[in-house]
Image (cartoon, rainbow, N blue to C red):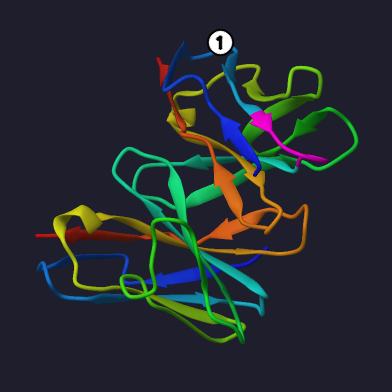
Amino acid sequence: SAVISQKPSRDICQRGTSLTIQCQVDSQVTMMFWYRQQPGQSLTLIATANQGSEATYESGFVIDKFPISRPNLTFSTLTVSNMSPEDSSIYLCSVAGGSGTEAFFGQGTRLTVV
Amino acid sequence: AQSVAQPEDQVNVAEGNPLTVKCTYSVSGNPYLFWYVQYPNRGLQFLLKYITGDNLVKGSYGFEAEFNKSQTSFHLKKPSALVSDSALYFCAVRNNNNDMRFGAGTRLTVKP
């Protein structure tokens, strides 16, 4: 298993500003994923962040809005840029091992944009 | 692409009764299926998975799930529900790119 720490756990931000969310894992992992969970809804994959390459974004998500860094095998950041109230969600970091293994999740960052 | 569906938004059961949370899947090739639980203001916790082998998979907190290939289902079950089982449950499938794809979620409420 993996222990994932996310910071901050929650934040209230003004519209038009940016917030960077940090994800720290207690072991080296190849694959890291960022998800968004809007209120009362399921998890939607934003992007896959692999060390040594640019993040791969899912349809509907773009790098300018959600820039991601992956400087090493234990750390990643997701920035939510130029925020609007529609960005109010829980953002979750996840790591996974090889095919057939379960994914592990951080506690999430609850973002409220006012 | 792989996907899962949870046909019920809400499941209500009385404490002590058996519970079932439904999930169906659509995959090409062998399915890697998972169940997660989310308690209020908490992250997702892994419950169990099916990779291969026995169709009945046992997991955490007394939960189990039955893989049924002919019905493409992976329903979550528990013989006797507890009030503390009340939470949001997600079925998920491991995609070919190794990310997880989640169902819409089912809110389970267990009443005393």
- Residue range in magenta is B25-31
User: Which corner quadrant holds the N terminus of chain A?
Assistant: bottom right
What's the residue type where badge 1 is placed? Asn
Seen in the image, is A70 located left or right of residue A42? Answer: right
**Residue B30 is one of the magenta-drawn residues:** yes
Judge whether A65 appears above or below A35 on screen. Answer: below
Instruction: Give me the residue at 36% from left, 39% from top.
Output: A41
Instruction: Give me the residue at 59% from left, 58% from top.
Output: A104
Is residue B63 among what the camera can see?
A: no
Q: Position of residue A79 (x, y in %)?
A: 33, 75
Q: Position of residue B73 (x, y in %)?
A: 70, 23
Is residue A29 among what the camera can see?
A: yes
**Residue A6 is one of the magenta-drawn residues:** no
Q: How many marks?
A: 1
User: Which corner quadrant holds the C terminus of chain A?
Assistant: bottom left
User: Badge 1 sits on which subunit?
Assistant: B
Instruction: Give me the residue at 24% from left, 60% from top.
Output: A111
Judge whether B101 appears above or below A80 on screen. Answer: above
Local packing at callout 1 (Cα closer than 10 Å; few below 14, some 14-19, many 20+) is few
Instruction: Give me the residue at 45% from left, 56% from top.
Output: A59
Find the residue positioned furthest to the right. B53
Q: Name the residue under label 1.
A: B17
Seen in the image, is B11 located left or right of residue A66? Answer: right
| Residue B12 vs residue A14, the one in the foreground | A14
| Residue B75 vs residue A78, the one in the foreground | A78
Q: Where is residue A43 in the image (x, y as percent from the top left)?
A: 45, 47
Judge whether A63 appears above or below B7 on screen. Answer: below
